[in-house]
Amino acid sequence: METVQDVKMNVYKFGNKTADGNSKLKNLLGGKGANLAEMSWLGIPVPAGFTITTEICTKYNEVGREETIAMIRPDVEEAIVNIENIMGSTFGDKENPLLISVRSGARVSMPGMMDTVLNLGLNDEVVEGLAKKTNNERFAWDSYRRFIQMYGGVVLGMKPESKDDIDPFEEIMEHLKDKRHIELDTEFTVQDLQDLVYDFKDAVKKRTGHDFPTDPWDQLWGAVMAVFNSWNGDRAIYYRKMHNYPSEWGTAVNVQAMVYGNMGENSGTGVCFTRDAGTGEDVFNGEYLIDAQGEDVVAGVRTPLQITKLGSERWADLAKIEEDDRRENYPSLEEKMPEIFKELDEYQTKLEDHYRDMQDMEFTIQEGKLWILQTRNGKRTGAAMVKIAIDLLKSGMINEKEALLLLEPNKLDELLHPIFDPKALKRANIIAQGLPASPGAATGQLVFFADEADKYKNTILCRIETSPEDLEGMNIAKGILTARGGMTSHAAVVARGMGKCCISGAGALKINYKGRSLRVGDKIYHEGDWISLNGSTGNIIEGKVATVQPELSGEFAEIMELSNKYSKMKVRTNADTPKDAKVARNFGAEGIGLTRTEHMFFEVDRIRAMREMILAETVKGRKHALEELLPMQRKDFEGIFEAMEGLPVTIRLLDPPLHEFVPHQLATQKELAEDMHISLQAVKNKVAELEEFNPMLGHRGCRLGNTYPEITEMQTRAIIEAALNLKERGIEAKPEIMIPLIGTYNEYLEQEKIIRNTVNEVFEEREDSIEYLVGTMMEIPRATLIADKIAERADFFSFGTNDLTQMAFGYSRDDAGKFLPVYLEKGILTADPFETLDQEGVGQLVEIGTERGRKTKPNLKIGICGEHGGEPKSVEFCYNTNLNYVSCSPFRVPIARLSAAQAQIKAS
Ligand code: PEP
Ligand code: MG
């Protein structure tokens, strides 16, 4: 069995069925290096090579080139000798040369983000030797020109000088093709290739002032350092930011003997998957090309062929190619090289069995010999992910816990929302990008005003930002697009709740309401123009893109069942309507963690009574308006309780600042004045009076209930009467009344008193009672600090991490979009704290609040209802902090359920 060195080394060799490392050393050897070592142990034919560790990369960044080379030179020299011995050729030798590749490899795969150099070790003399050895002059010179081209670009900086320029080497090749009246690279003669090598080297000399390096060792050190440098290239940095990978990881460098797929008809190269990455179907599949190098398969110049006969037949069927034609001109590898196919098939089974996950492999056939160049866990769609996990579980390859850990919770999203037809997406023209605020796909005609959302059959509502007044229009539109706002902006929160596709904060959009148009760069889109949104990526696409509704498979249900089995933390939902509550319950929500009552007031028949309440100058006037609202609220709550029969429902008392409910446009103000029989001026005065500099820190939350206790009374009455009405119908309601935005003990006490008095009043009137709880949001830092005191009275806490984040950071939820992108770009913040809970700071407040609350009441029920309640990393944090539940928007419930199970499995 494999024995891995205990002492950490700088360079790890592999090849010939043995290796210094293995797949457990991913952090040190990178994913590619660790898997090459592992494959070598498994007896799979990998070209011999070695890996320089990620720690050397980090060291290089500290001490620079010379010191790094001095440190690793003896190890690298020894490792090259090892390759020479295994491969039977010599680096730099003129008769029997060894050529090598130098590739990056971080601990996670970062496709195309870093640099690679192939065919290294060639110079004017070695190329002659290669030609003789292979008896293929063309191959030798083609390899040489490819090497100079690649090395020149990657190591010597021979890149286009401006974005209008083309690659300097491509320019030389184009020039020669023109001169020779040819079109394809394959048409170059040996003489052409020799001329190209000469011209390439000349261009290098002219541009860099130095000769192209002829010493293979100089070439090798240059390439190694270039790969290290590429870890800090723009592409890699961008990719790291996107995925939140720390820069400290560094990249390893893999140096390996070259093998060639372009040495004639018995050579080839390809890529294959142990299962279907799109559907998860358990079929070996992939593509290959005869007489080609790796990049030819991806470059798309030649059409690759299918590896298996089955795949080939399916492909031909789609491409409408007759069987005879297929067999003759597009044969599968299985038919063309049955022996090689058999061997490859053996390896793919062995690798999947070994890694116990779907593998994505690269291979090369050199003159009838198969080499495996790479294997890694394959990327897959959400649907494939679920199917593969369940299939592997059923086959006995993995156990239940491993099946759950194989899943990426966020990818479940893809299964729950309409998606773009993958075929249509290939042709999509992306015009701008925003934040992927709410996933799914939407396609529709542009409208710019919420009240025009029904102007066409399918619309995309495009706003600078949305407000609660837009709610109805948002509900009608197929998708929502805003130029401003972050992941917790109004549009984002509401859209997620609705399970509606939304892109927010697309700063490149210049919206002109007057002109009913939208400008992106110098292109203008008008109302009625078709546009498509990919809420999962944030891509804004020109025109119509076909969508398809994903189907929920039996495997999905099995995953959810397993999640429950392994998770003691509950998952509730944030839902404001019976419809949302039902959706969430279908997804497995175990109650409601937050009903935001304000959303109900925006419906047409309610907003009038609400405005009347706000405009009233006296308590009596207010009470009158509230009486009108009472039956409507009661009905809302009945619907929600019914949908959640038998499960707890947390209802939060009114929270937002009142100005959100009054009209801000002159025309609507006029209407309101007429309707209320008061002067326009009186309406304007009221609107002005409600205006606040910092409404998010202003007259909202329990400050409303404490200044207008009649609002608390009405809402409490509506909740309790609704619950009693259901009781009469034999339906169990479990209300939990939640007070928002508590900062002091007395604020809580005052509200609680009103609530309990009102409840008792209703109980007396009805001569009946029910169980109910009174508790509070924990969303002001001060409240978390005095949680022990508040817990003396409160039955439960729910962390409102949206406000808690806002107030802990001092970043306004409404305005943070102006600077957060820059902060993320510059690395001042590593993640948007409104999206992923800031465990370092805000997390401490959650821990303190929990600890102090439970000091007073050891069994205090505690949950979270901020947007973080459905984000996997934050869910894990909540589990580790011992919260009883997380609550999230309906469509995030499955994600939270899986995340909760994963957190528990990891912790055990
Ligand atoms: C919160 O602040 O986290 C919360 C859930 O309440 P809202 O987003 O409605 O302020
Ligand atoms: Mg809040």
Image (cartoon, helix red, strand yellow):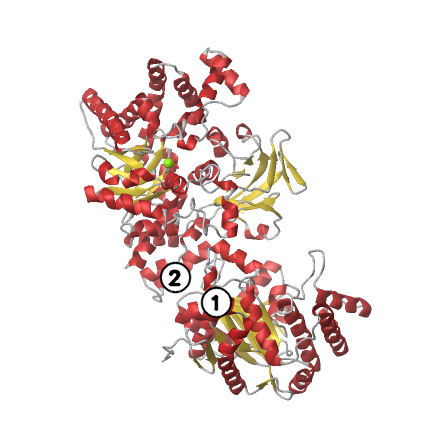
Kind of residue at disc 1: Thr
Q: Does the residue labelled 2 lie within 8 Å of ligand 1?
A: no
Three-letter amino acid code of the residue under disc 2: Asp
- Could you tell me residue 497's position as x and y percent? 42, 39
Q: Is mark 1 on a helix, strand or loop?
A: helix
First in residue order: circle 2 vs circle 1: 1
Which residue is pictured at 58% across the width and 33% down the height?
Answer: 447
Q: Residues within 10 Å of mark 2 (few under 14, many from 20)?
A: some
In this rendered view, identify the residue nearer to me: 796 or 417: 796
Query: What residue does disc 2 label?
Result: 391
Residue 789 percent location from the top left of the image: 22, 37
| Figure check: 390 above or below 757 | below
How many discs appear? 2
Residue under circle 1? Answer: 58
Q: Say left or right for 252 vs 91.
A: left
* Residue 212, horizontal then vertical, whole percent: 68, 75
